[in-house]
Amino acid sequence: MEFNDPSKDIDGWLHPICGAAISCLLEVQNKHKLLGNFLEIGVFEGKTLAYFIRASKNPEKVIGIDPFIVNDNENKGKIIDNTKRVQKNILRIRKETKSNSEITLIKGLSDDPNVKNHLNNLQGTFRAISIDGNHEHNIVLQDLCLSSVLSSREGILILDDYCNISAPGVTSALKNFLCDSLEGKSWEILMLFTPMCSPIQASTRIFLQHKECSINYSENIKTLINRIKFKSEELDIKQYHWRQINIYNNKAVPALIPKDI
């Protein structure tokens, strides 16, 4: 199965292994005829959002939350508004994927009153939520708690930058969420994806599922991703292997990691 990356022309960081994992997750949901909305907290230029748009269909909604303010490295780090660039990316992806879902970009932070007001009526309706906004502990924990309320029972939470040495707040917030928060008691780690690892740094994307989820995501995603063929000759799924890992007294879960670690 050849991997088709809808975000290949969009700036940002999303390793093809993680992109393939998200793609397989959404394919499993579509095969189960699961309907629901999509949310990304921390859009940047829309790489992960591109996968959500491709998988979505009317009447599903795709929502992206971001301040849409970035440093312009080509202009001495000047702060610029990149809303129009993201909108352009989304329009192109929508045309290429023939998506007919409703797509909304909300300019702001996840704890802004206008953002919360927009999401209040959508509690329990999201089937995929990506959390990649502010990486400070309290904000990540807040985003996890918010997402747990917004997600449906069959929905998946996707958390980026776990075990990233430059973002320790993500790792500590996930532990706080799963072990100490009331909302986190209903959630568990589903799978982990660590496409790159060095002696000083690893960055893992974690999938979380509701403990009462009725879909066997793990085996279905593993089956699909093991069949992936990347267009680049430099990347081969055979360079990776599955290992069972225990985190926070969670049951052993599958992790896809490079074979050399």
Image (cartoon, rainbow, N blue to C red):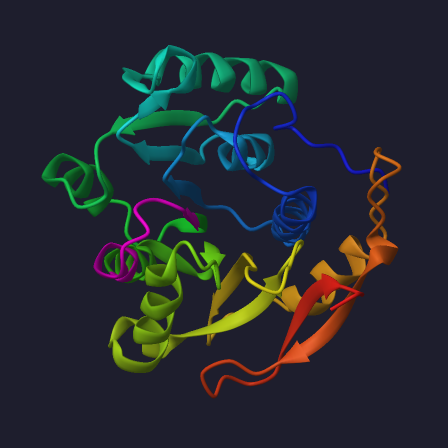
Q: Answer yes or no: is residue 197 visible.
A: yes
Q: Position of residue 223 (x, y in %)?
A: 80, 61
Residues shaded magenta: 130-141
Is 133 situated left or right of 14 in this image? left
Q: Is residue 242 above or below residue 90?
A: below
**Residue 65 percent coordinates (x, y):** 31, 35
User: Depth check: 199 or 107 in front?
Assistant: 199
Residue placed farthest to the left in the image?
113
Q: Residue at x 27, y 55 (%)?
A: 136
The single residue placed furthest to the bottom in the displayed view is: 249
Q: Nearer the viewer, residue 84 or 61?
A: 84
Count of marks placed on residues: 0
Image coordinates of residue 241 in percent, x first then y, are: 79, 66
Please determine whether, in this image, residue 143 is positioned above or below residue 246: above
Q: Residue at x 17, y 46 (%)?
A: 111
Q: Quadrant of residue 41?
A: top left
Q: Nearer the viewer, residue 11 or 65?
A: 11
Whether residue 57 can be seen here: no
Residue at image point 64% right, 54% down = 32
Closest to the observer: 140 or 166?
166
Q: For the C terminus, which image quadrant?
A: bottom right
Residue at left 32%, top 61%?
169
- Report whether 177 appears left or right of 130: left
Name above or below for residue 144 compared with residue 98: below
230 vs 144, left or right, is right
- Which image quadrant for residue 244? bottom right
Residue 85: give x, y in percent of width and height.
42, 13
